[in-house]
Every structure is written in structure tokens, then in C-alpha cells.
Image: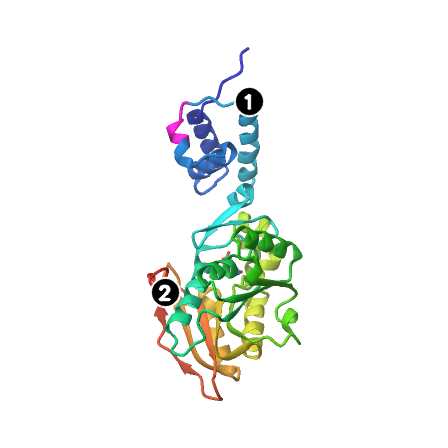
């Protein structure tokens, strides 16, 4: 019996059907992304060559990628890349896959630099606490050619990927990577920052089992589990932040919408912050809390909460 010759069209249809049965959200899209990845072409190219026959080797290679996705491994771990701030980042199971909402941290850092009167601008010092694959620090290094950045993570595996990404984006000479838990790499180092950013682990331990399998079974728990109510790192970062910020410097922290009330309360309770605010994400839910270290001792003042200025990127804000 002659073996079936698979063409792009039929193979995509078969893979889509398989992924659909496995309850994958976007079966057709994932089938296309994985075939394009395997053939090292753009997705559009698949449509331009929809009748192209594939070799047996290509078909078996594709089958194993589709099976991995069928087991709910995230697409990005299979392809090894995720786009963030219009840049490509290498990812593997050592790092959290960067999420679109985390771009808010980058946007807010740029907005603070450009709109805060008298604020240290381009040459500033910034820290990305818990950098993962390095997306936030590297995006800022690309946007601000004069800035110096520090990026830390408790995970050596994550820092390895972050360093690779910094090399690829040619900013490694401006980012100093340090390994350690939270503030630990900065104790006794005598650096204070104009801006500290963090997307800390903030999933409530109690909710962990309910996460989608892609997240729960494949992404690093270390990067996601924020302890009771997901607040344990947020609290330590808010409380410790004043010691590592310059006067007038900003702490910019991502969290879940329902955590922002408590985080704002904590900034009010901690001595040393003046202004504070929270910012909504693309789906209009509070996602980022900001707190500014007081210039001299002063009471905390609540800024009017704003939505994310969608035009911040490239708009010179
Ligand atoms: N945004 C991620 C999620 O909801 C959580 C990221 C984090 O804990 N830092 O899956």
C-alpha cells in the first residue's frame, strides 16, 4: 500500500481537528504556527503553498509538535519564542511566558520618565526585580539608550535565558544581572534606583490548582505562586521598595486587579511613599500599582487613577 502524501492543506486540517478534540482554544492558529515553525516560514507562506506536499520527515516532526500541544504544553515553549513590546524573546520552561499586560510596566516607566517634572530622565538607574526572560528590562534598555539597568531573579535558569535575550537585542553591556531572592542581591550594594519595576509571582496559592493546564503544569511555579492571596511578594516589594528607591523614584508593580486595593493600602501604611496610583490594563481592569518615594517626609497623596495611556508607545509621552 502506498503511503498517504500529506499536503499543507490536509495536514493543517487534520492537526486542527486533533487539537480541537484536545480542547485547545485556538486549534487552527496553533496548527498553523507550529507548521510554520517546523518549516521555518511565515504563516502567510503556508497559504501561498497550500498544495505543497510534505516529506515524511516533516510530517513526523509536525506530528510530535502537535502531540506536545495536545498535552497542553504552551505554544511558546514549543516554538521557543514570545513577542513582547514588539521584540522577540526566547523562552523555555525556566521562565514565565511574558504576557501582554506586562507591557504596562514598560509603558508606565516611560510615561513617568517623560511626564514627571524634574525626574531623572534618560540616564536613570532602573531595576527589574524578578526579570524572568528579561522582557521588561530589555525593552526598557532598547527604549532608553542612556539608561542603566539591573535585573534580578532567584532562578539561575531564568537568568541564563535573560542573558541570551539581552545579547540577542544587543543591550547586555547596559544590564547587570544578579541572582537572588527579592532584595537580597542588592543588600549592601549601595545602589538606589530611579525606577523599580516588578511582575512578581501573584497567583494565590489557594487558586493554583484551578489554573489552565498550560500554566499550572508547564510554567514555573516559582514565578507564579504568590502565597496566601498572592500577596506575599507584593507586600515585601512595597515595604522594601523605599529602601532601594532614590527620593522621588517610582515603584511600578504588576498584580491581579483584586489585589490593587490592598497594595495601595500597603503603600499608604509604609513610611516613605508620597504619591501613589493604579493603572488599568487593556481589558480595563486595574493591573499596575505605582508608588513614589517621597522627596522629604510627607503624607501619602492619592493621585487620580488613570487608564493606561494607549498612545504611550512612541508618542513621546
Ligand atoms: N499574569 C499571570 C497570570 O495571570 C500571572 C503572572 C504572575 O504571577 N506574575 O497567569
Q: Is residue 128 above or below residue 24?
A: below
Residue at x 35%, y 76% (from the top left corner): 304
User: Which quadrant of the rendered structure holds the N terminus?
Assistant: top right
Q: Determine whether, in the image, residue 301 is placed left or right of residue 95.
A: left
Q: How many marks?
A: 2
Question: In the image as oriented, which residue stretches furthest toward the top?
Answer: 1
Q: Secondary structure at mark 1?
A: helix
Q: Position of residue 248 (x, y in %)?
A: 47, 80
Residue at x 47%, y 58% (from the top left corner): 142
Q: Is residue 56 above or below residue 115?
A: above
Mark 2 or mark 1: name the one nearer the start of the chain.
1
Q: Label 2 to label 1, Cα distance in Å? A: 49 Å
Tell me if residue 202 is in the magenta stretch. no
Residue nearer the viewer, 161 or 300: 161
> Which mark identifies residue 56?
1
Mark 2 neighbour density, 10 Å: few (under 14) some (14–19) many (20 or more): many
Q: Determine whether, in the image, residue 211 is placed left or right of residue 103.
A: right
> For residue 119, which quarter of the picture?
bottom left
Residue at x 64%, y 58% (from the top left corner): 155
Q: Which residues are magenta?
A: 46-51
Q: Secondary structure at mark 2?
A: loop
Q: Position of residue 92 (x, y in %)?
A: 58, 48
Residue nearer the viewer, 145 or 6: 145
Q: Position of residue 141 (x, y in %)?
A: 49, 61
Mark 1 neighbour density, 10 Å: few (under 14) some (14–19) many (20 or more): few
Question: In the image as oriented, which residue stretches furthest toward the bottom?
Answer: 297
> For residue 25, which quarter of the picture?
top left
Q: Which residue is mark 2?
A: 308
Amino acid at each position: 500500500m502506498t503511503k498517504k502524501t500529506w499536503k499543507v492543506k490536509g495536514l493543517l486540517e487534520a492537526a486542527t481537528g486533533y487539537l480541537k478534540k484536545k480542547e485547545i482554544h485556538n486549534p487552527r492558529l496553533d496548527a498553523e504556527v507550529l507548521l510554520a515553525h517546523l518549516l521555518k516560514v511565515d504563516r502567510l507562506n503556508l497559504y501561498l503553498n497550500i498544495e505543497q506536499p510534505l516529506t515524511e520527515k516533516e510530517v513526523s516532526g509536525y506530528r510530535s509538535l502537535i502531540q506536545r500541544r495536545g498535552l497542553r504544553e504552551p505554544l511558546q515553549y514549543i516554538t521557543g519564542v514570545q513577542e513582547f513590546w514588539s521584540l522577540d524573546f526566547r523562552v523555555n520552561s525556566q521562565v514565565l511566558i511574558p504576557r501582554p499586560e506586562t507591557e504596562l510596566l514598560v509603558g508606565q516607566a516611560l510615561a513617568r520618565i517623560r511626564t514627571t517634572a524634574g525626574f531623572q530622565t534618560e540616564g536613570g538607574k532602573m531595576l527589574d526585580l524578578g526579570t524572568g526572560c528579561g522582557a521588561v528590562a530589555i525593552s526598557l534598555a532598547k527604549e532608553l539608550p542612556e539608561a542603566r539597568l539591573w535585573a534580578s531573579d532567584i532562578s539561575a535558569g531564568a537568568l541564563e535565558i535573560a542573558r541570551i535575550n539581552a545579547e540577542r537585542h544587543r543591550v547586555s553591556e547596559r544590564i547587570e544581572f544578579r541572582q537572588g531572592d527579592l532584595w537580597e542581591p542588592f543588600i549592601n550594594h549601595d545602589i538606589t534606583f530611579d525606577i523599580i519595576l516588578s511582575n512578581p509571582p501573584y497567583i494565590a496559592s489557594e487558586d493554583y490548582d484551578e489554573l489552565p493546564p498550560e500554566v499550572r503544569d508547564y510554567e514555573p511555579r516559582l514565578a507564579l505562586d504568590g502565597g496566601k492571596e498572592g500577596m506575599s511578594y507584593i507586600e515585601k516589594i512595597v515595604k522594601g521598595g523605599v529602601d532601594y528607591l532614590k527620593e522621588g523614584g517610582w515603584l511600578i508593580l504588576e498584580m491581579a486587579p483584586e489585589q490593587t486595593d490592598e497594595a495601595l493600602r500597603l503603600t499608604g501604611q509604609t513610611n516613605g511613599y508620597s504619591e501613589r496610583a493604579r493603572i488599568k490594563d487593556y481589558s480595563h481592569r486595574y493591573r499596575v500599582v505605582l508608588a513614589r518615594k517621597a522627596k522629604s517626609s510627607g503624607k501619602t497623596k492619592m493621585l487620580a487613577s488613570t487608564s493606561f495611556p494607549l498612545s504611550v508607545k512612541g508618542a513621546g509621552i
